Image: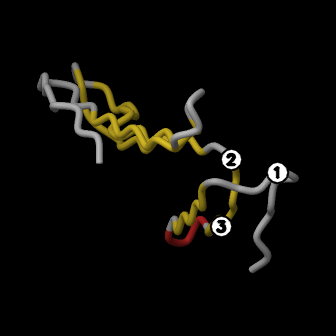
Amino acid sequence: MNRKVSPERPKFELRCHAGNAGRLEVVSDAVSVTIGQQIRREGKEQFWDSLLVECKQQDDGSLTVDVVVFHPTLRCDFEQKRL
């Protein structure tokens, strides 16, 4: 599979394998991925965003990966950690 490369030197690599729907492999200077799942809420089926991953370069040049987890009925407080 050919990987698409941005004109600048890429900072992140994304590999997504989505079963029978296909796959995607790219390199880029920023990446944002949202994963949703089907839930039943108030008697209706809907998609709920469950996970958000954002990768980007900060103004100071550092690279960050932010991960946000969502749940429709729970409130979670995850302490931020820097590695």
Quarter of the view holding residue 30: top right
Nearest the camera: 26 or 59? 59
How far, Cα to Cα, is label 2 from label 3?
14 Å
Name the amino acid type tagged 3.
Glu
Residue at 46 percent across and 41 percent down: it is 64
Residue 83 in picture, x, y percent from top left:
29, 48
**Residue 18 vertical position relative to residue 44 in the rendered view, above or below:** below
Residue 35 in picture, x, y percent from top left:
43, 44
Q: What is the secondary structure assignment of the residue under circle 2? A: loop
Q: Is there a contact, CB below 8 Å, between mark 2 and mark 1? A: yes
Q: Going by the image, does 28 lie left or right of 51?
A: right
How far, Cα to Cα, is label 2 from label 1?
8 Å
Residue named by callout 2: 29
How far, Cα to Cα, is label 3 from label 1?
17 Å
Number of the front mark, 3 or 1: 1
Across the whole image, how many numbered discs are drawn on residues? Answer: 3
Name the amino acid type tagged 1.
Glu
Number of the front mark, 2 or 3: 2
Query: How busy is the neighbourhood of tag 2: few (under 14 within 10 Å), some, or many (20 plus)?
Result: some
Residue at 76 percent across and 56 percent down: it is 9
Residue named by callout 1: 8
The N terminus sits in image quarter: bottom right
Q: Is there a contact, CB below 8 Å, between mark 2 and mark 3? A: no
Residue at 60 percent across and 27 percent down: it is 59
Name the amino acid type tagged 2.
Asp
Residue 41 in picture, x, y percent from top left:
24, 25
Residue named by callout 3: 25
Q: Going by the image, does 13 lie left or right of 18?
A: right
